[in-house]
Amino acid sequence: MRWAPAFVLGQGAVSPFGIGVDALLAGIFGGQTGIAARRRTAAFEAPTAVAAELPAATLATLGGDDDLAFRGAMAAAGQALAATAIPRQRIGLVLASTKGDLGGVLLDDPGDGLGLPGRLAGRLRRELGLGIALGAISCACASGLVAVAHAARHLQAGTCDHALVVGVDVHHPFVMAGFGSLHALDPTACRPFDVARRGVVLGEAAAALLLGRSPMGPSAPRLLGHGGANDACHITGPDRQGAGLALASQRAIATAGLTPQDIDVIHLHGTGTLANDATEAIGLANLFSGRTPPAFGTKGQTGHTLGASGVLELLVSIAALQRALAPSNVGLEQPDVTAGLDLVRSPRPLPRARHALKVASGFGGAQAATVVAP
Amino acid sequence: MSAPAVVLAWGRVDADGIVGSGRPQVRWADLGVAAPGDGRTFRRVFGERDETFRRLDRMSRVLVLAGAAAGIDQVLTPALAAGAAIVFETTVGSLDADLRFADSMAAGLCDGPVFAYTLPSSSLGELALRHGLRGPTVCMSTVEAQPGVALREAGLMLAAGEVEVAVVGRIDVLVGSRPTVTPICRAVVAVLVRASLGLRGVAAWPDAASDPWRDWPSIQGTSSDNRSGRIE
């Protein structure tokens, strides 16, 4: 089976670097980090001093931190839709989120989002005036790439000609306490693949991709292949050989009509946990016969934006190809994973920039991968 | 949609009990427990040990029961299971575990093992690891979308040749500890294979009048409160 290309017609982002894709890319390729001492979330009970929060100016532009998942998603979606004149009634919406709007889950919280992404998806679709409900994906931290594959599946089947994929997750006391209770938070920094790494630093973001069956112009970035897999070994821990991630990647590459030799750069999941980084490196090194193409991750800059991460990081993957430049792994000083993973230590020009592989993993063993062309 | 698939097996758990293709219904009343059962239910119904069933959250327990009632291991070879997609829809998601974790936060405990189940994909993972299902995993939150989105998704995967097998279903389990919650217990698991494989099925591709599809329509809560899991 080979996927029909899905063309990227619009992009949007709200991230710890501010509003807009340009702000995101300036931060990423400038080697900056959005991770800092907790301010807005300082009162959340969690064993960490840091987080990647949306800047105060961004919150002010969005209208405050109340109802932030909705406001952020609307802003990112609006950017992605702004560049097109496609009638909104003909656009399908897919939402990717781990928990959507968590209002109403905590005692004494009057909200009604209830951590159900489908509720947020319905609200977004109505507010944006989009005519087709394609669904809401909640596949933990693989949600973004699973949602992109879901949209591509519907484009290929002809359910719709255009699909807007929005990924969003924002800070909430529930999530921060939860990761803390699993001892999964790094207390001071995010250091994916580094010997000193101690866990995740949470981030918050919204990102959007408008996809279409045709480029609507001379050229457009393309999503060429999608693969999924389940580790089928543990609900919160990865397969020790990274087999599921490698299998998802293998499926994505094959369904793009490519071989591993055609991949020029990898955008890693790279959460900063001991097990995830080590097994991701093993799985990818095995897939690429012992030595991967240049590989970078961006959670040392954006934090782990959970259900938004797949969509947000695809924006960076596309930009890396378009600039023929792999950004550095911020936070990495002394690698502590197999040397078969070619970790980028400083911004590295790509001699070939034809295809990027983006990967993601989530609780429940969900693994996902997407192949992108500029 | 034309019939791209054959239903190899199905299982269902609901307020009455547990039933699957080729096995008689076991009623909760006969087990002496209310839906969705307790940590001993798996062994009492299936006569086998499941080492970790007792520690699972309710959503996972019900999904594991429905999968066992379908007899997934009996109808899928390991090779077929290794390529099987897992495609589910849920309306109330992991709200049951969410409320439990929120209660633990309020008590100052922050129960980590419960937090691990505050994502609906965790329950799918429990099903995957028991049956060696290593295909694409898709969990859909369906408050707005029409019931049956998982079936349509699986149908697209099978029709396009993306997978040969899909374990598809819906799962909604909510007991909750708060007075505003309306209990729900309903899960359907169906094993679908591409029609082109020529395998013989036990049920028709979506036929609203027969099992396993008859209970697929929308959940109807009885409370107007948002916590009931009602569809908007």
Image (cartoon, coloured by chain):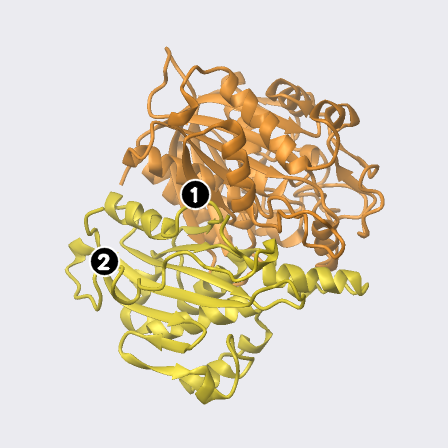
Instruction: Check if mark 2's residue and mark 1's residue have beta carbons within 8 Å.
Output: no
Chain A is which colour?
Answer: orange
Q: Is residue A317 left or right of residue A2?
A: right
Q: Position of residue A142 (x, y in %)?
A: 52, 45
The residue identified by callout 2 is B205
Q: Is residue A167 visible?
A: yes
Chain letter, yellow in picture: B
**Residue A63 sits in quarter:** top right
The residue identified by callout 1 is A249
Q: Residue at x 31, y 64 (%)?
A: B214
Q: Position of residue A370 (x, y in %)?
A: 44, 37
Chain under callout 2: B
- Say which element carries label 1: helix
Q: Position of residue A104 (x, y in %)?
A: 68, 51
**Residue B115 sits in quarter:** bottom right
Which amino acid lies under the numbered mark 2 shown in the image of this protein?
A: Trp
Q: Is residue B32 left or right of residue A149?
A: right
